[in-house]
Amino acid sequence: MKARSFQAQSPARKYLDPELFQKEGIELRFFRYDAPVYPQLWGDFLANLSTLDLVLNFGPKAQDILLRQQRF
């Protein structure tokens, strides 16, 4: 089975060659993801950490935070 599309975050645009994807018949799609801002236990907020950080700070509520943030 062959991929028909490839999705990447917008900042990856500068690293990907659209012609290579087009040559293989793969649609290249970019999206913007705004990471959630949430209180962290130690110090100032550090953006773009792992989902694990969110889970360790919020436990089961982490899923609700992520689902509210989806903006594709």
Image: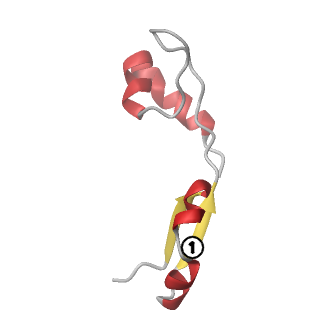
Identity, as a three-letter code, of the amino acid under mark 1: Leu
Q: Residue furthest top?
A: 42
Instruction: State left or right for residue 3 relative to residue 67.
Output: left
Residue 6, percent from left and from top: 50, 70
- Residue under label 1, please give it: 28
| Residue drawn at the location 41% of the way across and 22% of the way down | 60
Q: Residue furthest left?
A: 1
Look at the image and tell me in which quarter the N terminus lies. bottom left
Position above or below: 4 against 23: above
Instruction: State left or right for residue 30 relative to residue 55.
Output: right
- Foreground residue among 41 and 65: 41
Residue 69, percent from left and from top: 61, 37
| Residue drawn at the location 56% of the way across and 37% of the way down | 67
The quadrant where residue 56 appears: top left
| Residue drawn at the location 53% of the way across and 60% of the way down | 8
Position above or below: 20 against 56: below
- Foreground residue among 60 and 41: 41
| Residue drawn at the location 45% of the way across and 32% of the way down | 49
Residue 72, percent from left and from top: 65, 52
**Callout 1 crowding tier (Cα within 10 Å): few <14, some 14–19, many ≥20:** some
Instruction: State left or right for residue 46 relative to residue 56.
Output: right
